[in-house]
Image: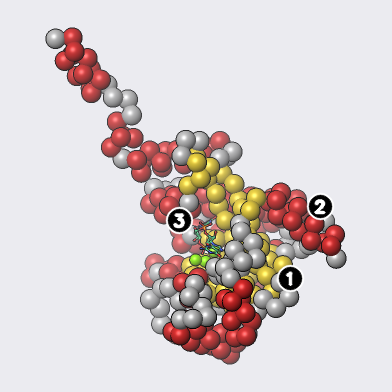
Amino acid sequence: GAKRLGRNHSLRFRPALDQQDSPQLALVSDLREALISGDQLELHFQTQHASQSGETVGMEALLRWRHPQQGMISPAHFIPLAERHGLMAELGTWVIEKACAQQAHWRHSGMPALTIWVNISALQLFQGDLEAQLASCLKRYQLSPWQIGLELTESVLLDERAGDMAPRLEALRQQGYQIAIDDFGTGYSSLGYLKRLPVDKIKLDRAFIRELPHDQADAAIVTAVLAMARGMGLEVIAEGVETQQQCQFLIDAGCPIVQGYYFARPQPADELEQRLSAARELL
Ligand code: C2E
Ligand code: MG
Ligand code: MG
Ligand code: MG
C-alpha cells in the first residue's frame, strides 16, 4: 500500500527528469547559467615560442569551464554542445571580451606586448558580426588589431556555408588582425584553397607532431608543409610540441614557431604573468 504509493509518487514527481534523461541538455542549461554568472568561465593562456631561442612570441587563449559539480570540463566537449544549442555566439563574445580585457590589463602592467590568439567558431564567422564586435572591444579597451589574432579551423574555412570566405577574411586582415588556420592538415582539403584564402599563419596540427622524429610519413608531411608555406609567404606554428626531440626536428626543418607542453601548458593569466616577469628578471 503505502510503499507502492511512495514509489509512484517519487516517479511521477521526479524533479530532474530532463537531467536524468539527457545529461547533455542538463549541461547546456548549466552552461547557460555559467554565461550569466560569469565566474565559472576562465581564459587560460598558452605561450608560443621561437623554436630556436625559446623566446615567447605570442599566446593562445583557451577557454576553461569550471563546473560547480563536475569540475573542469574540456572545451573539446562543451564547445560543440554550445554550437548545437545556440550558445556559441554568446560564448564567443565572452572570449573576445575577456581576451581584450586581459590585453588591456597587461599593457598597463608592463608585460611584453604579445598577440593573443583567440579561437573563433564557424558560427561566429557566419552568423555574428565578428568585425563590429572586435571593433567595439578594441575601442573600449584602446587596443590595436595586431594585439588580437584569429584562429579558424581548417574545416570552418572549407564549410560551404562560408560561400566565399576570402573577402571577409581579407577585410579583417586589412584592418590589421592576423589570421591563422588552426589544426592544419586534419581537414579533407585540397591545397588549392590555401592559395585563395588570405591568411598569415598555418598551425600544423599536433597529429603530425606527436610521432616526430621517428615516423617517416609525419616527418615528410611536416617538411613538405614547411616548404610550401615558405614558398607562399605563410608562417608556420607547430602545435602540441611535447619533447626536446620534436622541437629539435622542427628547428632543423626550419619551423619558426612552436607551441606545446614542452615549453608551457595553458595557465591562468596571473600565473603566466608571474612566469613571464620572473623570466624577465633573470635577464
Ligand atoms: P586548439 O585550438 O587546437 O587548441 C590546442 C589544444 O591542444 C588545447 O586543448 C591545448 O590545451 C592542447 N595542447 C597544447 N599543447 C599541447 C601539447 O603539447 N600536447 C597535447 N596533448 N595537447 C596540447 P584545449 O584547451 O582542451 O582545447 C581544445 C579545443 O577546444 C581547441 O583546440 C579549440 O578548438 C577549442 N577551443 C578552446 N578554447 C576555445 C574558444 O575560446 N573558442 C572556440 N571556438 N574554441 C575553443
Ligand atoms: Mg587554436
Ligand atoms: Mg589547434
Ligand atoms: Mg588542434
Give the residue at mark 2: 109
CA neighbours of label 2 inside 10 A, class few (<14), some (14 to 19), many (20+): few
Task: Identify the amino acid type marked 1.
Answer: Glu
Discs 2/1, front: 1
How far apart marks 2 and 1 lie (CA) works out to: 20 Å
Is the C-beta of the residue carrying label 3 under 8 Å from the nearest atom of ligand 1? yes
Q: Secondary structure at mark 2?
A: loop
Q: Which is nearer the eye, 36 or 283?
A: 283
Residue 52 falls in image quadrant: bottom right
Q: Residue at x 69, y 74 (%)?
A: 50
Q: Is residue 113 left or right of residue 39?
A: right
How far apart marks 3 and 2 lie (CA) works out to: 32 Å
Residue 241 in the image: x percent, y percent?
57, 70
The reply to whether residue 166 is visible in this rendering is no
Ligand 2 image position (quadrant): bottom right
Give the residue at mark 3: 76
Colour approach in the figure: secondary structure
Task: Identify the amino acid type marked 3.
Answer: Ala
Q: Residue at x 58, y 52 (%)?
A: 95
Residue 255 in the image: x percent, y percent?
61, 81
Residue 239 falls in image quadrant: bottom right
Q: Is residue 140 above or below residue 169?
A: above
The reply to whether residue 62 is visible in this rendering is yes
How far apart marks 1 and 3 lie (CA) works out to: 29 Å
Discs 1/3, front: 1
Q: Is residue 12 above or below residue 46?
A: above
Residue 162 in the image: x percent, y percent?
43, 68
